[in-house]
Image: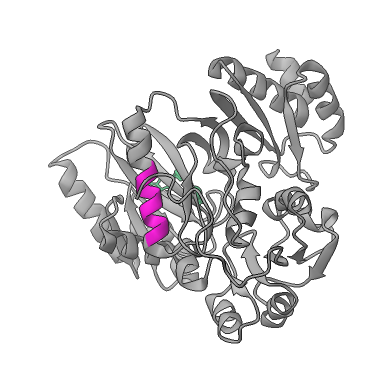
Amino acid sequence: VPPNSAPHDPAPTSAPAAPRIGVVGGGQLARMMLGPAIELGLPLTVLATDPAESAAQGAARVRIGRHDDEEAVRALAAEVDVLTFDHEHVPPRILEGIERDGLAAVRPGPSALVHAQDKLLMRERLSALGHPCPRWWRAVSAADVDAALAEIGAAAGEGAAPAPRAVVKTPRGGYDGHGVRIVSAGGDVADWFEEHDELLVEELVPFTRELSAQVARRPGGEMLALPVVRSTQKDGVCFEVLAPAPDLSAADQERIQHLALRIAEDLGVTGMLAVELFETADGEVLVNELAMRPHNTGHWSMEGAVTGQFEQHLRAVADLPLGASAPRAPHAVMVNLLGGSREDLAAGAREAMARDPELKIHLYGKTVRPGRKVGHVTLAGEDPADLLARAHRAERLIIDAVHEEQSA
Ligand SMILES: Nc1ncnc2c1ncn2[C@@H]1O[C@H](COP(=O)(O)OP(=O)(O)O)[C@@H](O)[C@H]1O
Ligand SMILES: [Mg+2]
């Protein structure tokens, strides 16, 4: 697959030119689809659980209901042409029913989406397809986790200091590090076995950094890759992204883009796909997990690329021609605003705007709680170190003035 296949619209489809879009979930990802939907003239309805949710505050059309309430999701599907998602938690059974009854086109479809919903299914399928993954095991008991740890220990060599460790994950429902635990004994996840029939065990990958590769794919197969970026997690939560990933050769950029394009094609994804990756000391990459929607590691593209990921997702699921994904500047950075000590972000945002007119600020309208994603900032330009320093300065100003004064 060439990284950017089919620059023009393939065969015309019978779909309406401006399909009505329904988004399940009212978080910040749905909220950031609103601007592009208005620009493109696509009527967009959000299914939120509460009128105060991030996207529900801004959407002209809102339905209130839960993502796992079959009636609520079907009612949304019945009044739109295309159903897409803010998160991956809609039960597949509901989506299969919507497809079967022809209520709306589901994009990505349930048969692709399961690989973003269930980390065990994802590992099974990617391994079967030959895509690079960390070593992994399925565990139905603490004894299975201990057996995996013993294998890891044996591979590390006899008498290897420290005791072997592994990463255990709940297959479903995790996000932002919830559902990920580093363990040295099966007993460390005894509580999880009370709620889950099976868990995913992975080797603890000694990665040198984390990368993310994003692609967009239309129903007919047209695809486009964004530049591969470096993402940095703190306590399992993304907080900083640099685009493109520094010190990645053109050949490696292309090789990793091809991996993401192949996965999108193999799984039949429509819309945006993010492939979270570990890069190891020998330059290999391993797939961590998949997201089939706009992704935190793509927020930089809103201002940093010709077509931002939210617009691209809408174009892809609406089966419209994709927009160019080329960067607008040599480098772009994104820094998340994770809730700190202050509840009102407006004063800090005003201060950050005054200090740096090039800064772009996105606030999600969410109640501030410690560590919660409440917004992000981006900058694009020539010097990545300067961009990162300015973005972090703005971050401190906005979320936590006390912190800023101390570290200024
Ligand atoms: N096998 C692993 N080895 C080392 N670190 C890992 C491994 N799996 C996850 N992590 C770390 O935990 C973070 C969150 O894990 P992930 O599976 O992506 O969960 P989430 O669904 O919460 O994003 C990753 O971004 C990475 O920093
Ligand atoms: Mg992740």
- Residue displayed at 35% across by 70% down: 140
**35 with respect to 118 (left or right):** right
The spot of residue 93 in percent (x, y) is 54, 81
In the picture provided, is 114 more to the left or to the right than 34?
A: left
Left or right: where 101 falls relative to 38? left
Quadrant containing the C terminus in the rendered view: top right
Q: Looking at the picture, how far across and down is residue 344, in whole percent?
A: 85, 36
Q: Position of residue 47 (x, y in %)?
A: 74, 67
Q: Residue at x 23, y 49 (%)?
A: 152
Residue ID at (73%, 30%): 360
Number of disc labels: 0
Q: Nearer the viewer, residue 137 or 124?
A: 124
Observer able to see residue 93: yes
Residue 361 found in image quarter: top right
* Chief secondary structure of the magenta portion: helix
Magenta extent = 257-265
**Residue reaching furthest to the left:** 158
Q: Residue furthest top?
A: 408
Q: Indicate whether residue 263 is drawn in magenta.
A: yes
Quadrant in the picture for residue 72: bottom right
Q: How is the image coloured?
A: one colour
The image shows residue 313, relative to residue 233, as above or below, that is below
Q: Is residue 287 within the magenta segment?
A: no
Looking at the picture, does residue 21 appear above or below residue 365?
below
As drawn, the residue found furthest toward the bottom would be 101
| Residue 199 shows in this picture | no
Closest to the observer, 365 or 98: 98
Looking at the image, residue 215 sits to the left or right of residue 29; the answer is left
Q: Position of residue 165 (x, y in %)?
A: 32, 46
